[in-house]
Image (spheres, grey):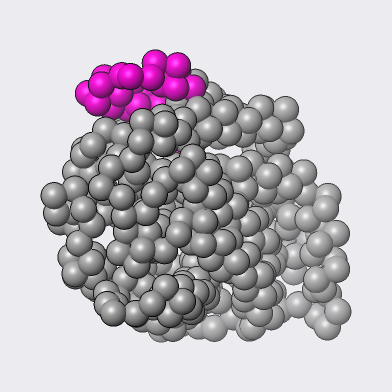
Amino acid sequence: MQTQKSEPQLNNLNGGATRPFGYKDKFGYLLGDFGNDFTFILVSGYLMVFYTDIFGLNPAAVGTLFMVARFWDAITDVLLGRFIDSRKNTKNGKFKPWIARMSLPVVISCVLLFLPIGGMNDGFLLAYAYVTYILYGMMYTGVNIPYGSMAAVISGDSVHRTSLSGWRTMGATSANLAINALAPLIIFVDNELSANRVFMITVVFAVLAFACYVGCVKLTQERIVNPESKPGEKSILKTLKGIGKNVPFITILIASLLFMMNMLLVMTVNVYLFKDYFGSAGVMSIFGLLQGGTTFLAMPTLAKLVKKFGKKEVGLAGLFIAGFIYVLLFFIQGISLVPFLVIYSIGLIGFSYYNLILWAYVTDALDYQEYLVGTREDGTVYAVFTFVRKIGSALAGGLGGFALAYIGYKSGAPSQTEEVKDGIYMLGTLVPGLIYLLVFFILFFFYPLNKKRTEEFSAELAERRANKANQ
């Protein structure tokens, strides 16, 4: 395709031209998020309940921990992104070497999170939680920032970008499926969390995550190489000014903050929803299968729908469906488990379409930054994006813990009151439904890159790259 031909080429180790974009890149990029989410989804879905039910910590204290740690994560994202952008390209690219360096530290730090500790007081356990959770966040940043930034330099072709977004989400979904479908069957015994089993499965997932990172590094290829900048050509002030003019990026930042906050809130509350409201933590396995199944169902139609209607349009439709279904479920309280899951599945289909296409929005916004300022600073700009997502995750972690405390959830209690169960149901349906609808309206009114506009600016940017490469 024309846009791909205009991409500056990165030479291989043997001195020849790099291979064309293909399934190796797609599968390798899938493995990257597969590895990421082997630890990230495990932590997001089960660390709160591990801290409340195994360590016996107050949910409000855990919420404060999550907020503090994730705010710090957000800061380190920007610092690392800026640092990577200041490094020179290597013969293996700019971003892949960082994934290789940081893959082992992140999986070790994840294992430390779920280490069973007995005989210690609450103060020690809370301090241990702070140290290990903040450490994990910093190590995860070391892998995730270069991984996310790399998508924009694997290919400059819009169709390839959409494909990478879909394959990335498929990787995350596969990890989600493995964790949410398999883990509840192992880590819960008689509807109670088992500390030793959690630790065992964490070790298994950590080993698998490391193997996935190795595969990502081996199979992907960075192709777009921005020329080394002249002294003073790049500055954080110039980058921030460009971001200030980048309406697509600012809009997706706001939408992503809310979306990330909502997604993590749902992941946190769902454990309590099935364990306490429906009385069966094992149902999390069925939920995991449904979530993975709807994503795999949506994936084959994604490219055709995007080609016909555009990325913005397909994502908006998915958000509206998800928000509507969540709100609908709230108004039919008292619903039994099977009908709940059937209706919920419809919402998951809408969620899947938006989630599959999200990273294509981000790479388009990164390109629009280059379109505005004339240089690529993918590490910094992507780090700003993850900074906002971490703020969302901080708010989600804090709100989840505070909300559970507010509705009266009692850590370690054999059962919760009916009022608490109703509060959990509201947190798992109405609240996420309203947030999804809010994200829908933000993108509908303010995100400017519809199908036509994306094609126009992408063609102009490809022509600029071609002219620069021929100079």
Q: Which residue: 45% across, 33% down?
A: 423
Q: Is residue 104 left or right of residue 389?
A: left
Quadrant assignment, res 128:
bottom left
Q: How many marks?
A: 0
Residue 405, given in percent of the width and then of the height, sits at 49, 48
Q: Which residue: 13% across, 49% down?
A: 190
Magenta segment, principal secondary structure? helix
Give the magenta range. 327-355
Placement of 312 over or under 167, stated as above or below? above
Q: Nearer the viewer, residue 227 or 258?
A: 258
Quadrant assignment, res 288:
top left
Residue 372, given in percent of the width and then of the height, sits at 80, 53
Placement of 404 over or under 341, stated as above or below? below
- State yes or no: residue 140 in magenta: no
Q: Nearer the viewer, residue 366 or 158?
A: 366
Q: Nearer the viewer, residue 241 or 44?
A: 44
Residue 358, given in percent of the width and then of the height, sits at 53, 44
